[in-house]
Image (cartoon, coloured by chain):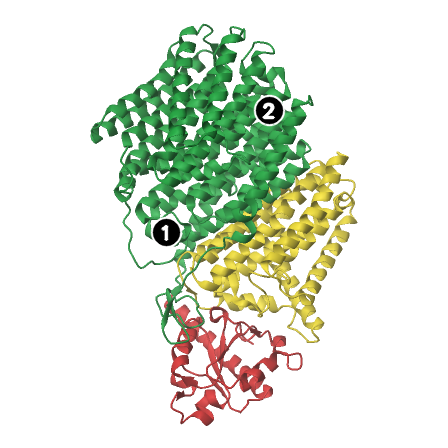
Chain colours: A red, B green, C yellow
């Protein structure tokens, strides 16, 4: 396991979700699923987060917010789109206010479908994201070495 | 031995001279010249004294002519007070002034007073002379540039600068006379001059508020003068000797208490603090000179002189309790102030409270601390007042909230202000060491209440200074540019103050050995150091580190290349760090303010109870002393 | 010998702090009927923080944070070297001022509020720290740590009230509920991350390491209450320290965060009653 995957801190943001997936994310923190045993902490601060977990689709209000939050996270970072609304816009895809899934504004690394996504799937998604995070970290380190 | 008359007379002559000069350029040169002369003369006096063996010198036994002139001048001052008070319909000053002048003149002309030297040159008075000359002289130089800016953006205030500067110089003359006097009647005369000058300067702007505050200051200082007069009366009719040294050796609690009352009113201790924060309406040079660096130091100077007698005495108990109580309550009230000059006023009263408490306990250790506190406080407070005044001329505001991000707008003034603030409370600057000394001395003297006061008081002190400092260094890019309107002579004075402060902190052990220890020896007969040499040198090392560490870290952080991102506002930051998008989709301005805790620590809650409490302490203890308790 | 102790503090304190932090997290998790992270989790956290990209909101926050760390190290090293405890405590408060400056420097809402609350916290615990130093002086006759630990009897026998007051205020220093107003180790912060909102990566790692130094220093002061000339006082002191740390963790999990008025009043009251009365007794005894 690499540097990042031993201590991934996540930021959870609700773009326009009905809160169903949000509740499932919070469930992961509860004693039944307890993701802190992997060293995962739910910090509310993008400056200190490695993983951005987004639920809900992008609408006009949240578009700039998601971009700004993403820019305020330091590299290496991964984005997990939780729930079908975050992946593609879900059942609201044709609505006038929904632009689509999260990947319309920021690059997404892991898609976790479901409505609402189950805690087991979310944890699965996070574990996949950890692998990607480690790879990004290695690439970043190589990049820094090359620059010197 | 004409040096002392010259030292007192020269500033007085300059005062007259400046008052008569109407041409601005010539007046400016006269002020610079006068300040330089005063500083030079004080050094000459110091050299003269050292050459004569560096021992206390008592002078001037036969002084009929001068006494007569003083009587005439006192009558003139009384007349002036009566005239001004009646014109503005205040009758309390009339009552106080008449009674105290009558008391002193009666005493002087009916009691048989022993012939004795009227003036004393010793280490303590010379130290005060140097402080008065240098801090005072530099403030006069600062005032030249400051008053230009002040009148430029206060067009409603009548330009009476000749009067203002002549009063500053007259004040310097009176302060020299005060600290060099040994005869209490002479000291009383100079004391009264300083009260009247303070009254005239507070009323400089002639607004209703200024007039009201000036009369406040007048009656409180006159009350102290009445105490002084009562002490002279008691001394004269119980032995005929009105020397200060006799008051100390006599040891009568009532006489000491009357003199202490004068000192407490002059140093604006509770319950007499109102006049000092009311005096902040005056232009900054008068606040810096009179109301922080020198006039209020006259009160603590008197208490330090009396301190050998105050130890173990009821008067000393009263003084130390009032001092400690004032220290903690005024530092709490300073938390609730957002006007920078008011913060400085409360902080002055608070520090004076600490010095007063030290003098009141009257043992060598506490007086050691008191002398140190006096030195450091004079320099740093005067520098702070000057920087706040200059800031006001450039920013058009002296509200601390408007100083947000001043580091980026007025960097030089921020550095000076920052050094001043850090010097007031941060380890290992001088004030903190002095406070440490005071703490240790209070513990050694067995005073539980004072130890508690200092423990809580230093916590509250740290609160209001740190939040001001935090405001100054905020990296906030303001919308509007600000031009630094500070004149060269203002910077000259402030830089010299900053350099003096840093030097004094670095030379702390030297100060202890060559100045403060000998002063304590002169007062008490012997001295033992409160802080050992090793601790003092460690302090100097710490001071160096407090400069070196951030500097080194500056270079370390420069080597780390950080990418700059906007501040966190839940993603709603518009991008300029000043606005965010609200729920209607509109831009809303971000406002950040400090905590002022006005309902818990402010004047509305604390002032009246503390005035009642401290006044009753004084009244009760005076009654005990009149009844004969020692 | 003293130099060794100071060097030991310099090198070992972050490790000890990390282990204590890991132990804290496991214990809190077990109290909440969860499994909790591995013991070495804080090391992994720090390692990750060092490897992140450096972002900042201004150019001075890092230097102020580093100054905070350096001054904290100096304060702790001086304590472990055995010098004047009052000087160590004054330098400790200077270090805290630098942290507050670091947080105020970015002129942002959350860190500004965090800085204001941190300032309030410092005002709340400062009286008891001064009283504890004075208490040591009255109980043992010296401000020097070296003299304090070489006394025949433990200082706590003469200063029980001050120990209680200090335990109460140490809740603030350890950033544990109910007094974790300015920033919290757990994610449930109503001001995002408070003081540390704009700190990330290297910056945050520096602050965490400084906190570990501070934890060890505070535990060191707790030990001072117990250590005396006898060899068995040392393991006893460490045992007492661990007990106190456990009590802090217990309080953290049992209490919720209070408002600043509550914190200030309760701390000052406890200081007055426990510390002030103790001080009175000590002064009367002398």
Closer to us: mark 1 or mark 2? 2
Chain identifier of the residue bearing label 2 in the image: B
User: What residue is rendered at 45% in x and 41% in y?
Assistant: B344
Which callout, 1 or 2, points at the residue further toward the start of the chain?
A: 2
Q: Is residue B182 visible?
A: no
Asked which secondary structure carries label 2, the reply is helix
Q: B555 or B129, which lies in front? A: B129
Image quadrant holding the C terminus of chain B, namely top right
Asked which secondary structure carries label 1, the reply is helix
| Residue B65 x/y as whole percent | 40, 7
Q: Is residue B597 left or right of residue B417?
A: right
Q: Is residue B621 visible?
A: yes
Same chain shared by disc 1 and disc 2:
yes
* Mark 2 surroundings: few (<14), some (14-19) or many (≥20) residues within 10 A: many
Task: Say if mark 1 contacts mark 2, CB within 8 Å.
Answer: no
Q: Is residue C225 left or right of residue C40?
A: right
Q: Is residue B352 above or below residue C130?
A: above
> Any mark on residue C145, and which?
none
Residue labelled with disc 2: B257
**Gap between marks 1 and 2 measured at Cα:** 46 Å
Q: Is residue A145 left or right of residue B488?
A: right
| Residue B622 x/y as whole percent | 63, 27
């Amino acid at each position: 396991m690499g540097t990042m995957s031993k201590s991934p801190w996540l930021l959870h943001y609700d773009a326009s979700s009905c809160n169903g997936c949000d509740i499932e994310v919070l469930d992961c923190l509860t004693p039944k699923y307890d993701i802190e045993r992997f060293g995962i902490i739910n910090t509310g601060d993008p400056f200190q987060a490695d993983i951005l977990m987004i639920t809900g689709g992008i609408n006009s209000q949240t578009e700039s917010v998601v971009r700004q939050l993403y820019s305020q996270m330091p590299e290496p970072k991964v984005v997990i789109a939780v729930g079908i609304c975050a992946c593609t816009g879900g059942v609201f895809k044709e609505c006038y206010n929904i632009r689509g899934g999260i990947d319309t504004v920021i690059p997404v690394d892991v898609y976790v479908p479901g409505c609402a996504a189950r805690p087991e799937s979310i944890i699965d998604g996070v574990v996949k994201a950890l692998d990607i995070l480690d790879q990004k970290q290695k690439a970043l380190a190589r990049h820094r070495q090359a620059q010197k | 031995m004409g040096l002392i008359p010259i030292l007192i007379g020269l500033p007085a002559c300059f005062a007259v001279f400046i008052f008569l000069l109407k041409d601005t350029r010539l007046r400016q040169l006269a002020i610079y010249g006068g300040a330089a002369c005063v500083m030079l003369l004080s050094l000459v006096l110091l050299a003269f004294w050292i050459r004569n063996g560096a021992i206390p010198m008592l002078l001037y036994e036969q002084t009929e002519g001068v006494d007569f002139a003083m009587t005439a001048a006192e009558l003139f001052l009384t007349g002036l007070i009566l005239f001004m008070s009646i014109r503005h319909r205040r009758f309390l000053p009339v009552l106080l002034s008449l009674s105290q002048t009558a008391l002193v003149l009666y005493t002087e002309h009916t009691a048989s007073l022993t012939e004795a030297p009227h003036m004393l040159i010793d280490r303590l008075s010379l130290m005060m002379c140097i402080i008065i000359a240098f801090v005072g002289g530099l403030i006069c130089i600062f005032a030249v540039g400051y008053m230009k800016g002040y009148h430029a953006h206060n067009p409603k205030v009548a330009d009476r600068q000749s009067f203002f500067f002549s009063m500053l110089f007259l004040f310097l003359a009176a302060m020299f006379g005060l600290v060099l006097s040994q005869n209490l009647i002479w000291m009383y005369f100079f004391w009264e001059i300083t009260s009247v000058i303070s009254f005239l300067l507070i009323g400089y702007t002639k607004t209703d508020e200024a007039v009201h505050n000036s009369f406040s200051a007048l009656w409180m200082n006159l009350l102290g003068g009445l105490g002084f007069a009562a002490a002279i009366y008691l001394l004269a009719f119980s032995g005929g000797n009105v020397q200060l040294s006799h008051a100390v050796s006599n040891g009568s609690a009532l006489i000491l208490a009357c003199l202490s009352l004068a000192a407490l009113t002059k140093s604006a201790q509770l319950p007499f603090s109102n006049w000092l924060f009311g005096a902040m309406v005056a232009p900054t040079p008068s606040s810096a000179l009179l109301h922080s660096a020198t006039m209020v130091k006259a009160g603590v100077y008197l208490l330090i002189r009396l301190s050998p007698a105050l130890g173990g005495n009821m008067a000393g108990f009263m003084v130390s309790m009032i001092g400690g109580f004032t220290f903690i309550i005024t530092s709490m009230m300073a938390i609730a102030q957002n006007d920078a000059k008011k913060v400085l006023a409360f902080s002055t009263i608070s520090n004076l409270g600490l010095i007063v408490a030290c003098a009141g306990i009257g043992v060598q250790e506490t007086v050691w601390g008191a002398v140190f506190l006096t030195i450091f406080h004079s320099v740093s407070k005067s520098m702070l007042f000057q920087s706040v005044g200059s800031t006001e001329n450039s920013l058009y505001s002296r509200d601390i909230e408007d100083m947000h991000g001043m580091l980026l707008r007025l960097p030089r003034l921020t550095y000076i202000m920052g050094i001043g603030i850090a010097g007031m409370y941060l380890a290992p600057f001088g004030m903190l060491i002095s406070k440490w000394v005071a703490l240790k001395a209070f513990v050694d003297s067995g005073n539980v209440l004072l130890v508690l006061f200092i423990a809580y008081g230093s916590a509250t002190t740290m609160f209001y200074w740190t939040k001001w400092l935090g405001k100054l260094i905020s990296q906030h890019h303001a919308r509007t540019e600000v031009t630094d309107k500070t004149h060269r002579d203002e910077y000259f004075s402030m830089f010299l103050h900053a350099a003096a402060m840093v030097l004094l902190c670095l030379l702390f052990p030297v100060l202890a050995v060559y100045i403060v220890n000998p002063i304590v020896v002169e007062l008490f007969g012997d001295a033992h150091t409160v802080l050992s040499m090793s601790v003092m040198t460690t302090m100097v090392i710490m001071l160096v580190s407090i400069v070196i560490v951030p500097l080194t870290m500056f270079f370390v952080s420069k080597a780390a290349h950080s990418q700059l991102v906007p501040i966190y506002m839940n993603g709603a930051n518009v991008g300029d760090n000043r606005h965010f998008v609200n729920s209607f989709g509109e831009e809303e301005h971000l406002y950040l303010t400090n905590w002022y805790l006005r309902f818990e620590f402010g004047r509305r809650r604390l002032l009246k109870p503390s005035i009642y409490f401290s006044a009753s302490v004084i009244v009760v203890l005076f009654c005990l002393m009149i009844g004969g308790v020692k | 010998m003293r130099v060794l102790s100071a060097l030991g503090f310099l090198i070992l304190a972050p490790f000890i702090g990390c282990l204590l932090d890991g132990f804290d997290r496991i214990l809190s998790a077990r109290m909440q009927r969860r499994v909790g992270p591995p013991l070495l989790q804080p090391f992994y956290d720090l390692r990750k923080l060092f490897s992140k990209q450096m972002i900042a909101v201004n150019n001075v926050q890092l230097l102020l944070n580093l100054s905070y760390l350096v001054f904290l190290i100096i304060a702790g090293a001086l304590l472990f070297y055995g010098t004047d405890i009052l000087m160590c405590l004054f330098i400790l408060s200077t270090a805290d001022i630098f942290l507050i400056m670091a947080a105020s420097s970015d002129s942002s809402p959350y860190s500004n509020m965090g800085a204001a609350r941190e300032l309030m916290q410092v005002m709340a615990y400062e009286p008891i720290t001064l009283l504890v130093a004075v208490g040591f002086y009255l109980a043992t006759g010296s401000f020097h740590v070296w003299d304090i630990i070489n006394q025949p009897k433990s200082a706590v026998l003469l200063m029980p009230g001050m120990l209680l007051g200090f335990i109460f205020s140490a809740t603030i220093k350890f950033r544990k509920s109910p007094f974790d107003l300015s920033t919290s180790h757990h994610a449930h912060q109503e001001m995002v991350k408070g003081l540390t909102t704009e700190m990330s990566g290297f910056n945050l790692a520096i602050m965490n390491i400084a906190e570990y130094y501070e934890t060890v220093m505070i535990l060191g002061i707790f030990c001072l209450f117990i250590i005396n000339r006898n060899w068995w006082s040392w393991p006893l002191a460490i045992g007492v320290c661990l007990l106190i740390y456990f009590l802090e963790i217990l309080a953290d999990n049992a209490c919720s965060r209070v408002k600043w008025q509550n914190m200030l009043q309760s701390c000052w009251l406890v200081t007055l009653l426990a510390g002030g009365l103790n001080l009175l007794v000590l002064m009367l005894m002398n």
